[in-house]
Image: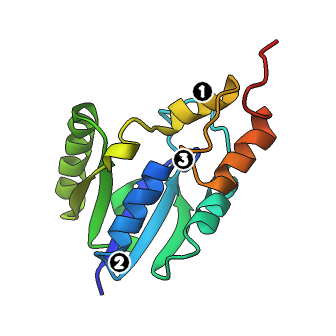
Amino acid sequence: MATALCPGSFDPVTNGHLDIIERTARHFDQVIVAVIRNPQKAQSLFTLEERQEMLHEVTAHLTNIKIEFFMGLLVEFAKDHGASAIVKGLRAISDFDYELQMAQMNQRLSGIDTFFISTSPQHSFLSSSLVREVAKFGGDVTTMVPAVVAKRLIERFGEPGRKQP
């Protein structure tokens, strides 16, 4: 049974993330979506548990998905869970530079391969940080994130279109 690992901070999960997860699920027997705490990123908007819960909700239609969170080396988590591949989505060449370096390090440390999936064109501009910023300043993100995520962003920041103080 082939198991893939889709890691990310998912703060929040976007339609681009969901697209990569769904496409990965078509090619692997099991997909573990690993919610990581990335110390290089600024303060998180949602807790690890909130991100895990949102991912459970938006992937409920996929029968071969597990959602977990972890801290530490990705390759150790992959080894502990029997993953034979890491799958990463790429939006732009700038993503590739960073992800290639990580893929080579992961391969060197553990022998695990990384597969890259290009983001679908309609999602290529999306990033969690951009979605957070748009929502924070009253922009409408309902076409950028699943409905349950949009609801949580509205609960956190208020309705789209509001004026900033």
The three-letter amino acid code for the residue at tag 1 is Glu
Rendered-image quadrant of the N terminus: bottom left
The three-letter amino acid code for the residue at tag 3 is Arg
Of labels 3 and 1, earlier in sequence is 3
Of labels 1 and 2, earlier in sequence is 2
Q: Residue sitting at 39 percent across and 35 percent down?
A: 125
Q: Position of residue 54 (x, y in %)?
A: 64, 59
Q: Is residue 30 above or below residue 103?
A: below
Q: Is residue 60 above or below residue 163?
A: below
Which residue is under mark 3?
Answer: 37
Give the image quarter of residue 110: bottom left
Which residue is under mark 2?
Answer: 82
- Between the C-alphas of marks 3 and 1, the distance is 19 Å
Q: Secondary structure at mark 3?
A: loop
The outermost residue toward the bottom is: 1
- Between the C-alphas of marks 2 and 3, the distance is 21 Å
Residues 114 and 108: in front is: 114
The answer to whether residue 81 is visible is: no
